[in-house]
Amino acid sequence: MSELKNDCLMRSLLKKPASRTPVWMMRQAGRHLPEYRKLRRKAGDFMSLCRDPKLACEIAMQPLRRYELDAAILFSDILTIPDAMGLGLHFVEGEGPKFRKPLRTERDIKSLSVINSEDDLAYVLEAVSLIRKELDGSVPLIGFAGSPWTLAAYMIEGKSSRDFVLAKTWLYQHPEILHQLLQKLTLSLIDYLNAQIVSGAQVIQIFDTWGGILSDAAYEQFSLAYTREIITNLISRYEDREVPVVLFTKSGGNWLEEIAASGCNAIGLDWTVSLREARRRVGARVALQGNMDPTVLRSNPECIESEVRRILDSYGSGSGHVFNLGHGITPDIDPLHVSVFIEAVHRYSGA
Ligand code: CP3
């Protein structure tokens, strides 16, 4: 395998000195790009894009042609796993993801099987190896998955929700059944993420988008315990290099010490935490990724630049910071503002 031409993301995730602060954006491939919207119109729907490795590869490359990003991320979705488990994922325009067969009874959960990625998600693995080939060592490729709790929340609710009240009711009323579901998801996710690593993913990010809606006690038992089990069972070195793991927990600022002890190399932070404070709490053990509010990108170039500077200053000097947004970029953002953002990170963090 070729050496990486740009290794500043890998170095920063491993807390080694880097020439400047690396930058990439959650949801960098997608609806804010007109070239993405054009391909999606042609394909008809989002899942057809995901299921076609050549199209998925093209879409993963689109943001790299526009912006000087320090990483590519696999184009897919966290909900491909529940889909492979038979829940029937589809996307309704303007409403987000839906499952035809959400989990409603104990029997539904007992009848779920752990997936075998090589058979059930071959299209994702093919996309990973195509993107890796296309990148040709320019920047690293990030593979990803949702956390067991975040996937379970969608599987029980059947769709997006603000509070996932059905899933949380199960947690209190039938904790042992929820644990069975989380265990099956954990085994599926270990298989899936290791298959992504073997297919070419050089970094892994786990999205615990809904960890932050749990109580303190429930977060440890129903989310972090399973994510920790996954991290422990991931291939940590492949083809002579470490495979760093980033754990992003939306609204997880209360639990930084616990997250840092999970075995991850870096913590993904949303914009509600201070980078300075996060670094003081856990910066000796892990790298930090984040954490600009994506709404800043709606403002103007001056505001974007001053926010970038504020965040870089807040982390301070030394290695271990990966610049990112605190959550995914939204479809309303002007690509010109993204260029201003990326260039500002380069300019103000350069050696
Ligand atoms: O560029 C990238 O980040 C790579 C691809 C990627 C997508 N989804 C593509 C996508 C990644 C990493 C994800 C992760 C994802 N998917 C998460 C975790 C991150 C987060 O944002 O919290 C979650 C919760 C999902 C589930 C999901 N997928 C929802 C709720 C939706 C609909 C609303 C939305 O946010 O867009 C999707 C659809 C989706 N996933 C789109 C894309 C490009 C939009 C599809 C379209 O309408 O064209």
Image (cartoon, rainbow, N blue to C red):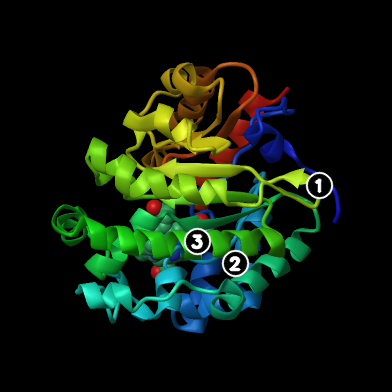
Quarter of the image for the C terminus: give it. Answer: top right
Which element carries disc 3, helix, strand or loop?
Answer: helix
Q: Would you name the residue on which mark 2 appears?
A: 59
Q: Are circles 1 and 3 on residues that touch, CB within 8 Å?
A: no
Q: Residues within 10 Å of mark 2 (few under 14, many from 20)?
A: many
Question: Along the line of sight, which residue is nearer the eye, 12 or 178?
Answer: 178
Residue 69, visible in the rendered structure: yes
Q: Local crowd at mark 3 within 10 Å, few (<14), some, or many (≥20)?
A: many
For the point 48% across and 23% down, the residue is 282
Q: Percent from the top left, x then y, of residue 20? A: 69, 29
| Residue with the mark numbered 1 | 240
Q: Amino acid at mark 3?
A: Leu
Alpha carbon distance from label 2 to label 3: 24 Å
**Does ligand 1 reach within 8 Å of label 2's beta carbon?**
yes
Residue type at tag 2: Ile
Relative vertical location of residue 188 with respect to residue 267 in this rendering, above or below: below
Across and down, in percent, residue 305 comes to 51, 29
CA gap, disc 1 and disc 3: 23 Å
